[in-house]
Amino acid sequence: MASGSYTRKTAQQSSSEEGVTTQIPPRATRQLRVPQESTQDDSYNAFETRPAAPASRSLSNRTSAKASPKKPLSPRPQVAAITPPRQSERLVRSEGKPGSYWLKPWVFCSVGAIIFLAILLSAGIFQRPSLNYFFSNNLQAYDIQVGGDQAGSWQHDPRTKILPQSGPYAVLSKPSISADLINQVLSAYKSPAAGKGQALYDLGVEYGIDPAFALAFFMHESTFGTKGEATKSLSLGNLRCIPNFRCEDNFAQFNSWEDGFKAWYQLIRNLYIAQWKLTTIDQIIPRYAPAADNNNEKAYIASLKHAIDTWHANQIIVQ
């Protein structure tokens, strides 16, 4: 027979088993969180698991544990995705004002216009009548620069002397008119070169050319400097642009009438006579004033001869 405390414990245990149903708490295993989508990196996507609490933990402890909020994990700083701004936004940010959207097109248009104008200008320069040659109907080339493109060979006087020649209208000869007659002719025609007769005469003697021919060219080209380009170029023979002198309107601009006289004498003596062997008016004019340059060669030759004949007869005005 059991007796004492054992007997009482057995009795109490059996009575409690018969009348009272003891509520057994569920296992104290922490319920796992349902995984949620996250934008954090992969190390934070793994579910957090912890070992289950021991069964001996009291219900009150479990309740307090559930009641206490869980300390959230501090998320890593997220890097915002960089999206390229729209065209208008880029222009506004770079230029500072919305109107600058049209700046680049205007710049490109301006540059294109400048290039186009430069091309037109260069084309116009090359198309001017200052080309080295004109071609006649028989495709013969004429130098319309009147020797301007060969100025390096005739602007400097050669050392070789050229002997005077005889014959009708031979350019290389002694003066056939006086300096006084030249001045009378210039004064009668109200030439701006009036009083320069002595300079024209002396240069003819220096270069071995009869000054009557120089005066005849002066008359035919510009009526002694009263008409055409010679009124400002001070050129006896309307020479094209040459080195050492200013160029304007495709003609050489001389500083004085004396400079214009000398350049003409150099051209005829050093180029036409010394190099090309052209010694008479009939030979010189087809090269000096070719028909391809809109000249009437025959009329030009006849005009020069008539003027020279008039002055040889001591007459001033050429009829």
Image: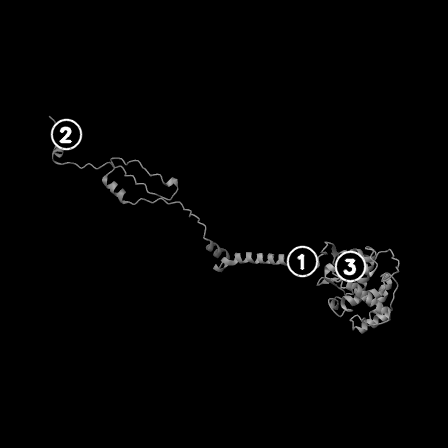
Badge 3 marks a residue whose secondary structure is: helix
Q: Quadrant of the N terminus?
A: top left
- Left or right relative to 122: residue 197: right
Q: Which mark is residue 6?
A: 2
In terms of image quadrants, where is residue 16? top left
Instruction: Look at the image and tell me whether residue 98 can be seen.
Output: yes
Q: Earlier in the sequence, mark 2 or mark 1?
A: 2
The alpha-carbon separation of the residues under discs 2 and 1 comes to: 138 Å
Callout 1: few (<14), some (14-19), or many (20+) C-alpha neighbours within 10 Å? few
User: Looking at the image, which is closer to me, 77 or 55?
Assistant: 77
In terms of image quadrants, where is residue 296? bottom right
In terms of image quadrants, where is residue 46? top left
| Residue 248 drawn at (x, y percent) | 71, 63
Q: Earlier in the sequence, mark 3 or mark 1?
A: 1
Give the amino acid at mark 2.
Tyr
Give the amino acid at mark 3.
Pro
Given this view, does label 3 or label 2 mark the residue nearer the observer? 3
| Residue 155 drawn at (x, y percent) | 80, 58
User: Looking at the image, which is closer to me, 130 or 160?
Assistant: 130
Q: Which mark is residue 111?
A: none
Q: Earlier in the sequence, mark 3 or mark 2?
A: 2
| Residue 93 drawn at (x, y percent) | 48, 56
Give the amino acid at mark 1.
Gln
| Residue 251 drawn at (x, y percent) | 73, 62
Labelled pair 3, 1 in contact (Cβ < 8 Å): no
In this rendering, is residue 160 above or below 300? above
Residue in the image at 77% along x and 60% along y: 288
The alpha-carbon separation of the residues under discs 3 and 2 comes to: 160 Å
Callout 2: few (<14), some (14-19), or many (20+) C-alpha neighbours within 10 Å? few
**Residue at which label 1 appears:** 127
Q: Which mark is residue 286?
A: 3
